[in-house]
Each structure stands twice: as structure tokens, then as C-alpha cells.
Amino acid sequence: MIDWTDRHCRYFHRQLSPHAVLYTEMITAPAILHGDQERLLGFSNAEHPVVLQLGGSDPAQLARAAKIGADAGYDAINLNCGCPSDRVQQGKFGACLMAEPSLVADCIKEMQNATGIPVTVKCRIGIDDAPPEIMLRKFVENLVAVGCDMFIIHARKAWLKGLSPKENREIPPLDYKLPALIKHEYGVKVILNGGIKTVQHVRDHLEIFDGVMIGREAYQNPWFIAELEHEIYQTPLPCRLKILEKMCEYMTERAAQTDTHSGTPIKSITRHMLGLFNGMAGAKTWRRILGGEAHAATNAHDFIMPLAQQILSHNREG
């Protein structure tokens, strides 16, 4: 979810679900070590629990980056071994690391030694022509040996050549049985990822797995998170207007922040909110106005609330 689940997205999603565990976009260890740490790692206390997802393959670099993340207040660290993009492969991290389980084990061990918070791994069931039932077991065995006990498994192979990242999310067939076998055989916690798009899917998977991770469906249809919160935790569905009031307050606060040269533009936050009214009359207008006019807006409340009230009134929802 590079460039998607930044701090503003996570703050918005937290308004929709008090219980969800939020993950950062994947941030490379070198970027943290040599870049603007406040810009990369800054977050609101409202985001907790929040996990820092790292990319990298150098144990020493990852250990230093993990320590910085732990000191910044993140609740856990996650090493991404599942992203198949060309850019990630060129950096020798992401899904290609599944072919080097001993190196990943070294990375995890160093990260554990450097922090006092949980260190987990996100992976695929395999890559390229390697049989998943062999590759995934070998991968998990190496990590269990150094004390890793939680795996987020995207239940598809990743083809490192020939498929785009988008195709790698859709074309390789899903195999939910193998992650379930891994959970049973190794006694580890498994969070299932991939192809989960309905509340019933979530309910079904929670009977087997320790949790589910939802990425693009949650981003593109954020109300889905609120529906999940309501169904799983029996909390009342939130009021969209109250969520937007909170977001307007947040935008005003961020516009005044001094950690950027001129504060955070409204458009940097509203871009994550385009799907809030998906499936409702007026959703297209909402997306068009927020996507096309936010760059010129100077007052978040005056820009957002009248339009939202109009849409909700038309749909008879408050």
C-alpha cells in the first residue's frame, strides 16, 4: 500500500473502526535511516494500535530502522516479504525474499534483538514456479526457529516476472487451505490476506484464522471498515457527518503544523476519503468535487460539510 496508507489515511480509517489494527505503508529501512523521519514515521496517538511495515534485506539496517520505529511509539514492526513490484525487487526485498528464508530469519532475529515489541512477517504462499507447499513451509520453519510467531499470509503466489503488481493481486489463484495448514502445523498465528471483500468472508475466515488483513477493499470502500466494526464488535455504526466533522478538525490542525514548510494541504487528506459514499446517490459528485477542487480549498469545513449534508439528506441518512 505504498503511497496509500499514510498517516492521514490511517487517521481517517481510525474514525471508522476503533478496533482495527492499522498498518503503515511499506517504508524502506534506508529511507528511515537517511531520510526525514518525522515525515516518514510521524503519526497521531489516535492511530493506535498501529504497526510499522518495513522493507529491506540488510539485517543491520532493518534492526536500526526497527529500533527507531519502536522508539517512535509503534506497537509492532512488520517485515514485508510479499510485495512483487519491480521497484521492490530491484532493492532486493519484498516477495523475492521468500527465496532466501535464512536471510529473512537473520533479519527478524536482529530486529527482535533491537526492539521490545512484536516483529511479524507478511508474505505470499510462494513465488514463481516453486511449489507453494514446499516454499512456504521452509520459509515459516526458518522464521519460527528464531521466534517469529505471527505471519500475515497473502494467499496467492507472486510471479516476479510477467505480471504487474495489479495482476499479482488478481490472477494467481487464491489458496486459503495452505495458510490454514501452516497455522495448524506450526502453531503460529496467521492473519489471512487476499480476496476478502465481504463481511461474510471475514466471518468465515475468523473461524479458522487469527485475523484478516484487508487492503484495497478497505481503501476504495472505507465504509466497509465501519460495517466490519459493527458486525464483529457489535458497536453502533458511526455517523458519517460526525466522522467528517472530525476530519475537518484534523485538516485544520494539520494545516497549522510546522513539520512541513506550509502545513498539510487539504487535498493530501481528502484524497483518502473519496470512497466514503460509495454505493450512495451522490457518490460520483463527491468523488468529482473532492478529487478536483480540494487543491483550491482553504477551509475544510466550508468545503466538505455542505456537500456531505446534501448527499446524506438525499439518501435520508444523518
Image (spheres, helix red, strand yellow):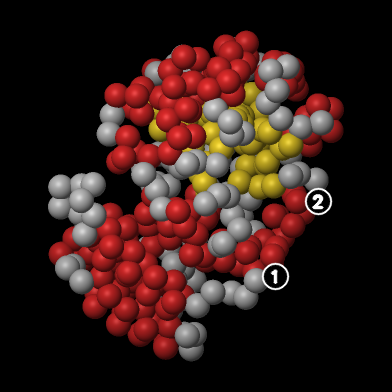
Residue type at tag 2: Glu
Q: CA distance from mark 1 to mark 2?
A: 17 Å
Residue at the spot 57% in from the left edge and 66% down from the top edge: 226
Q: Is residue 278 above or below residue 191?
A: below
Q: Is residue 24 above or below residue 105?
A: below
Instruction: Determine whether the residue tagged by mark 2 lies in a helix, strand or loop.
Output: loop
In the image, farthest residue toward the right: 185
Q: Earlier in the sequence, mark 1 or mark 2?
A: 2
Q: Which residue is identified by label 2?
A: 207
Camera-side residue: 69 or 285? Answer: 69
Q: Quadrant of residue 115?
A: top right
Q: Is residue 217 above or below residue 311?
A: above
Residue 245 place in picture, x, y as percent: 37, 75
Residue 292 place in picture, x, y as percent: 23, 63
Query: Which marked residue is nearer to the observer: mark 1 or mark 2?
Result: 1
Q: Residues within 10 Å of mark 2 (few under 14, many from 20)?
A: few
Q: Which residue is identified by label 1?
A: 234
Residue at the spot 48% in from the left edge and 28% down from the top edge: 66
| Number of numbered discs overlaid on the protein picture | 2
Residue 163 located left or right of residue 136? left
Camera-side residue: 93 or 14? Answer: 14
Residue type at tag 1: Gln
Residue at the spot 40% in from the left edge and 27% down from the top edge: 28
Residue 285 located left or right of residue 315? left
Residue 54 place in picture, x, y as percent: 47, 30
Q: Residues within 10 Å of mark 1 (few under 14, many from 20)?
A: few
Q: Quadrant of residue 130?
A: top right
Residue at the spot 61% in from the left edge and 58% down from the top edge: 19
